[in-house]
Structure formats: structure tokens, C-alpha cells
Amino acid sequence: MSPPRKLHIKSYGCQMNVYDAQRMVDTLAPEGFVETASVGDADLVILNTCHIREKAAEKVYSELGRLRLAREDAARNGRDLNIVVAGCVAQAEGDEIIRRAPVVDVVVGPQSYHNLPRLLARARSEGRAIDTEFPVEDKFAALPPPSRQAIRARGVSAFVTVQEGCDKFCTFCVVPYTRGAEASRPVARILDDARRLADNGVREITLIGQNVNAYHGDGPDGRTWSLGKLLYRLAEIPGIARIRYSTNHPRDVDDELIAAHRDLPALMPFVHLPVQSGSDRILAAMNRKHTADEYRHVIARFREARADIAFSSDFIVGFPGESEEDFKATLALVEQIGYASAYSFKYSPRPGTPAADMREMVAAATMDERLARLQDLIDRQQHAFNRAAIGTTVDVLFERAARNEGQIVGRTAYLQPAHVMASEDIIGEVRPVTLDSLERYSLLGRLATASPRARASASTGA
Ligand code: 5AD
Ligand code: SF4
């Protein structure tokens, strides 16, 4: 048998890319590839790229410069190093990559990962290969499932892609062009994936998609299922203690999703609900298809269904035409909602999107200043949220040994890291933890004896 070849994947950007990287590893495992953490001993390097903002896209070309040197090093030692560019930059700029970077052997778009073995073979015989088609078949059906060992090695929390692509066409966003039209996987396949994960020790699944709450998959009953309906069914799978989903569009929140939050203890009360701006004028220019008040109303419906629910969001500052007044409306919305965490970005014009042609650019210094003000507010909210946890007893799903000797780290319902002194036996378990202190973004605590729910019912006598 030939020795295994080594594969190094570097992923940028969103959770979907993290998941796709795992699927590429699974696709190449039957070809004799094993993963390596270092470029130095790799036979194959895959850059899994992100096109969402200019900075992210630029990283590809600087990384390819470094890889050219690594390839020369490998050649001096008599080894081949093959280089693949995957992900959304591959999709959007495939031909340009081929032209600008002779070091690249294969360019493969997100819809074609199942073709990787074929593309590598073609690159060997023809020099280079490119595949950025949007095929009609379900790419997920063509990708091999992860092995049992791979699932176990990846830990207690796993992603499952349930839909891909987006039909919203926000005017700033490349996703509808790089990931294509919105498409949902059939319910039965998702349930199979989830069962397989649960059977191999996974306790938490996060359903992912570019617009996951637009999910509308074929159900086993011949009807179209919503995300809410899917969540009810997933919650019945033995072993799955926690379910999450990301990322969402406010317009696609329906009653069944809200009801799922009311009814399912396994559905974590933490929702990523991007709003981008608090100004109706800017929301309209962004083609978000909702107003700030409609967003507030969606938040209120979630809160009514589950009082302890918390939110995170995405914001863009400096969208073309954004005035100080528009920006203040964003700050006011953040003040009013109160987020557990949030991401904020400076607007970055993306070629081919409608906003890239808008004229009223906001000055760079103004963008910097607005970003700093918004991030300061979000930071203060995040700290307040984390500090409020001190002194409470909450459920933590333990994931792994921490860097500090003897400590095990897990996550609360709100994804806050929580550290306790304990044996590794608790990895994979949900245990109540009394939280004593906060260090930067991590909570420190100790294992408690009774679960928060049991304590609550004991103290109320219910
Ligand atoms: N400029 C800045 N931020 C962007 N995002 C998407 N496109 C752009 C862009 N052109 C942000 C949005 C989105 C998140 C994933 O990235 O906030 O929700
Ligand atoms: Fe992009 Fe808007 Fe679709 Fe989100 S909803 S992926 S921001 S187009």
C-alpha cells in the first residue's frame, strides 16, 4: 500500500466553509489523504476561501504567494505540492485565479466538491482543472458521509448543512451569486445525518445555511417542511441534547419557528438574527425587505415564546448614503434590543452587486469612527450579558480539556465558554455549573449538584 498523502485545508469566512472543509476531507479520505495541521509536510493544500468582503478575498492572493514558496521548497526536497482554491472566491473569480496564479492546480466552486478527486486527476494529466458550475444534482447526495472515526475526532458539537444559497439579494451581498439560488436538502437526509452523528457521540448539532430559516425541504410525508417542523423532528433523536441554527433572515421567521422555541427544551435560546442597520431608509436601500419596527416585532415574538432567549446580529456601517442620523438609528436599535453579542463590519463594495454602483460613498474616516462607536456599544452589552451570568447555575455542554491543566471547557446555552476543574469523563455531558467569575469572555465555575431546572422546580415547590 502506498503511504497516505497529506492534506492541509485552510478555511476562511463562515461556518458553512468550516463544514465544507470537513466534507472535502471526507471526499478525499477514500483517495488515501489524511489531514495534517502543517503546510510544511502537506502534499495537497486547499484554500477554502471567502468573498464576502474585499479584505477576505484579498487574503487568497497573499496566501498563494506564500504557497508558491512552499511549493518550491517541496520541489527541492523531491516532493510535489498540489494547490487547490475552493470556496466563494473560486466561484466568483475562478478564471482570474487561473490567470494570476500559475501555482494553482485546481479551482473548485462550492457546488462541485464531490468532483475533487476527478479534478485532481485531471490536473495531473492536463496541468490544471477548473469547475465552477452550478450543477442541478444535489451535491450533498454525491458527497460521502464522514467516517465514524472522523465524527468522533471532530468532537461533541457538529454542523449539518440543511440549505444553501440565498434568494434575498441584499444589494451589498455576493452570496446569491457565489452560492446560487436557495436550495433545501430533503428532511430524510438531514435526519439520517443527525442520527449518524448522535450514534457516534455528537450531542449538539447546529443546522447551517446562508438563510437557514428559509428552509423548505421535501418531507417524508410528501409535503414541504419548514425549519420549525424540522426542528421538532430533530429534537426527538436520542442523544441530541442541543440544537441550534444559523444564519437567519428576519422576514423568514414564521409561527412554527417561534412555537419550536416555546416547546423544545433542546432548542437553544440563542438566535443569530442579522439586521444590518436600524434605519428604514438604509434597510430599503439594502433591499432587506423589512423595516426596523418589523425587526423589533420579530424579536418581541421570540421573547414572548421564550423569556430567556438572547440574540446576536450582524451590522454594516457606512453603507452608501448612510447619514449620521441613519447611524444613530442603528445605535438606538442596538440600545433597545440589547444583544448578547454581535458582529459589525465596514461596508465593502463587492463587484457585481447593486450597491457597488451606488455613488454616495461614506468617507473612510467616518466609517472607522462609526464602527468604533458601534463596537463599543456592542462590547458593553456583551460584557453586561456575561456578567449577569455570574452567580447563576446553568447547563453547560462540556467539549474538551482546556489549556489550563485540570480544567474542562464547555459552553452555556448562549455559547459562552465556561471552565470548571473536573475529570475528562464529563466531556460530552450537559452538567449544571455554578458560575463564579468572568475572565475576559470566559466564565469560570464549578460543577453543581442539581440541574437548574430541578432547582427551579424545587424552590417553587412545583
Ligand atoms: N460589506 C460589509 N459587510 C458585508 N456583509 C455581507 N456583505 C458585506 C459587504 N459587502 C456582512 C453582513 C452579513 C455578514 C455575513 O457579512 O453583515 O450578515
Ligand atoms: Fe446575503 Fe442578504 Fe442573502 Fe444574507 S439574506 S446571504 S446578507 S443576500
Image (tube, helix red, strand yellow):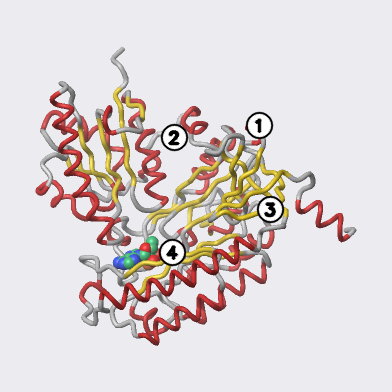
Mark toward the viewer: 3 or 2: 3
Q: Position of residue 165 (x, y in %)?
A: 36, 57
**Disc 1 to disc 3, C-alpha distance:** 22 Å
- Kindly indicate whether the residue at mark 3 contacts the one at mark 4 (C-beta within 8 angstroms): no
* Amino acid type at image mark 4: Tyr
Residue bearing the label numbered 2: 145
| Displayed quadrant of residue 347 | bottom left
**The C terminus sits in image quarter:** bottom right
The numbered mark, 4 or 3, whose residue comes first in the sequence reads 4
Mark 4–mark 3 Cα distance, whole angstroms, equals 27 Å
Q: Nearer the viewer, residue 68 or 82?
A: 68
Disc 4: residue Cβ within 8 A of ligand 1's nearest atom: yes
Tally the numbered discs. 4
Distance in Å between CA atoms under marks 4 and 2: 32 Å
Query: Sequence-wise, which precedes: disc 3 or disc 2?
Result: 2
Name which residue type carries label 1: Asp
> Which residue carries the number 1 mark?
425
Q: Amino acid at mark 2?
A: Pro
Helix, strand or loop for disc 1:
helix
Q: Secondary structure at mark 3?
A: strand
Query: Few, some or many C-alpha atoms within 10 Å of disc 1 (few <14, some 14-19, many ≥20)?
Result: few
Q: Earlier in the sequence, mark 2 or mark 1?
A: 2
